Image (tube, rainbow, N blue to C red):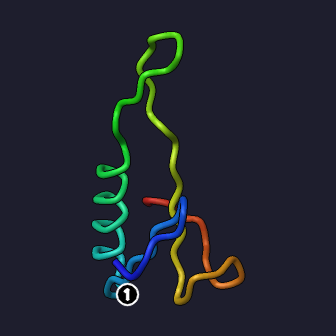
Amino acid sequence: MLFNVHDALVMQVPDDLEHIANAMKALDTAFRRPLVGRDGKVFYMKSEGKVGPAWGKSTMKDWKDN
């Protein structure tokens, strides 16, 4: 992990699909925790991943696990 800011976490992993996929799955597992709403129902916060050579909208693309 390089750093985190409010609602973003930046990691550095080797530039190959297997390492990237493993890192994204680990992050999803870490963030995917059951939460309870005001109505008492359990829900999970949605998250998204982006991948790129540098942190910034112009260099990053949405992560698709396929």
Measured as percent of width and height from the top left, residue 27 is found at: 34, 59
Q: Determine whether 1 is above or below 6 in the image.
A: below
Question: Mark 1 is on which residue type?
Answer: Asp
Residue sitting at 55 percent across and 88 percent down?
54
- Quarter of the image where one finds residue 13: bottom left
Measured as percent of width and height from the top left, residue 39 is found at: 52, 10
Quadrant of the image containing the N terminus: bottom left
Q: Foreground: 17 or 43?
A: 43
Residue extending furthest toward the top:
39
21 relative to 7 in the view: left or right = left
Residue sitting at 51 percent across and 75 percent down?
51
Q: Determine whether 58 is above or below 7 in the image.
A: below
Badge 1: residue crowd in 10 Å (few <14, some 14–19, many ≥20):
few
Measured as percent of width and height from the top left, residue 33 is found at: 34, 38
Q: Determine whether 23 is above or below 29 in the image.
A: below
Residue sitting at 44 percent across and 60 percent down?
66
